[in-house]
Amino acid sequence: MFALFGYDVKHIVRVDTTRKLTLIDNIFDSLTVVCMLVYFVEIFLQCQADSEIHVQEDPNSPFYWRYKYSFYFWMDLVSTVLMALDMAWLLQVMFPINLNQPKTLQK
C-alpha cells in the first residue's frame, strides 16, 4: 500500500511549498528504501524458490512455469528500481533548482 499511495500521502501531509528537503521527505525516503529492500529480497527469494521447485518438475508439463526471467519478474524488477525516482534527495540531484534566482526563459 505504501508503494502505491505513499507519494500522494506525502504531498497531502507536506505543508512546505519550497523545494527544500523536510523531515517528511526524509521519513518518506527512508520508508521507500525499506520497501525497495523488501521487494528486492522478495524477488530474490522467489527466484530461489522457483529454482528449487522446478528441479523435480517435468518441463513438458502444461503447468510448467518459471518466475525467473518471465514477464512478471521483469515487471517486479523494473517497478522496484523505479521506486527510487520517488525519493526527494535523488530528484534534487537529478534536477537541481536554484531557488534564489527568478525563473526566466532562455532565447
Image (spheres, rainbow, N blue to C red):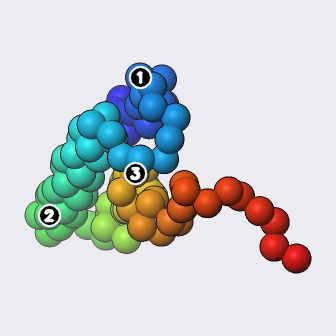
Amino acid of disc 1: Val
Residue 77 in the image: x percent, y percent? 37, 62
Residue wearing tag 3: 88
Between the residue at mark 3 and the residue at mark 2, the CA separation in whole angstroms equals 33 Å
Residue 66 against residue 21 in the figure, above or below: below
For image coordinates 17% across by 67% down, the residue present is 51
Q: Nearer the viewer, mark 2 or mark 1?
A: 1
Q: Nearer the viewer, mark 3 or mark 2?
A: 3
Residue wearing tag 2: 48
Residue 53 falls in image quadrant: bottom left
Visible residue check, residue 82: no
Task: Indicate the secondary structure of the residue bearing disc 1.
Answer: helix
Residue 29 in the image: x percent, y percent? 29, 46
Amino acid of disc 3: Ala
- Give left or right: position of 13 versus 55: right
Mark 2 or 1, nearer chain start: 1
For image coordinates 40% across by 51% down, the residue present is 88
Residue 34 against residue 49 in the figure, above or below: above
Q: Nearer the viewer, residue 40 or 83?
A: 83
Task: Indicate the secondary structure of the residue bearing disc 2.
Answer: helix
Residue 38 in the image: x percent, y percent? 19, 49
Q: Nearer the viewer, residue 44 or 106?
A: 106
Residue 70 falls in image quadrant: bottom left
Q: Are marks 3 and 2 in contact (CB under 8 Å)?
A: no
Within 10 angstroms of label 2, few (less than 14), some, or many (20 or more) residues?
few
Residue wearing tag 1: 13
For image coordinates 14% across by 64% down, the residue present is 48
